[in-house]
Amino acid sequence: MKFEYAPGATPIDADEATGLIPSHLTLQHELNEYEETNILEAVDWLFGRRRGDPLDQRFIRAVHRRMFGQTWKWAGEARRSDKNIGVRWYEIPLHLNQMLGDVRAQIEHKAYPPVEIAARYHHRLVAIHVFPNGNGRHARLMADLLLTELANQRFEWGRESLTTASEVRSRYIAALRAADGGDCQPLLAFLGQITD
C-alpha cells in the first residue's frame, strides 16, 4: 500500500506499516474509510457509556485502541520512533505525565475557561504525539471528552473533516503551529464554534 499524506500529517514508517491489519486495502482512501468506520464505533462506545477519565494515561491509550484497533496492530501503544512532530519517543511518558498534571491544576484552579483548558489539552496531546498515527483525530476526540466533562459541550472542529487537504485543515494546522509558539488565540478562534 502506498500512503499519501495531507499537509501536516505524520508519515508512517515501514515498521509501523507492517502493523496494518486489513490486508485487502490497497489505496489511501480505502484506509481512510476503514479507519473512519473504526473511529465512529469508538465515538459511539465513548459517548454511549459512563466515560473514563481523559486525564488518565491508561484511558488515553484505551481510547486510541478503540479508535484504531481494527486497523493497526499497534493501536493504543506509544510510538517507538521519532516523527516529524512530537517529543522524542522515549520522552513521551514524561511529557504526557507533565501535561496531565498541568491540566489537572488548570481545572482545579480555574486557570482558564473550560473551552480554553480543553483547547490547550488538545494542543499538548498533539504536540507530544503519543502514537505512531491518528494523533490529531485521537486528540480531537479526547478534547471533546474533556470539554464534555467540564462544560457539557463539544467542539465543531471547523465543521468538516480535518484528515484531507482543505482550507479548514490549513487553518487548523496554522492554529496548532501558533500554539506551538505560545499563542493559543488562533486555536481558540478556530474552535470558536461549539455544540451542546
Image (tube, grey):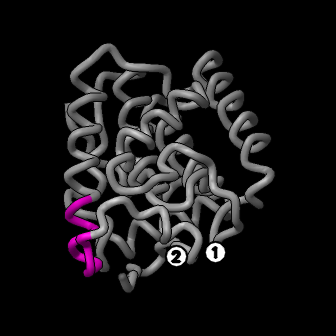
Residue 173 vs 57, above or below: the answer is below
Q: Amino acid at mark 1?
A: Asn
Instruction: Confirm whether the magenta stretch covers residue 36.
Output: no
Which residue is rendered at x = 26% and y = 41% of the image? 194
Q: Position of residue 111 (x, y in %)?
A: 62, 27
Q: Which residue is mark 2?
A: 11
**Few, some or many residues within 10 Å of mark 1 (<14, 14–19, 20+):** few
Image: magenta residue range: 24-34
Q: Position of residue 106 (x, y in %)?
A: 63, 26
Predominant SS of the magenta segment: helix
**What is the CA distance from the residue labelled 2 to the residue labelled 1?**
8 Å
Q: Nearer the viewer, residue 27 or 169?
A: 27
Q: Nearer the viewer, residue 1 or 40?
A: 1
Quadrant of the image occupied by residue 127: bottom right
Instruction: Confirm whether the magenta stretch covers residue 27.
Output: yes
Q: Which mark is residue 84?
A: 1
The local secondary structure at tag 2 comes to: loop
Q: Is residue 76 left or right of residue 115?
A: right
**Few, some or many residues within 10 Å of mark 2 (<14, 14–19, 20+):** some
Q: Are marks 2 and 1 in contact (CB under 8 Å)?
A: yes
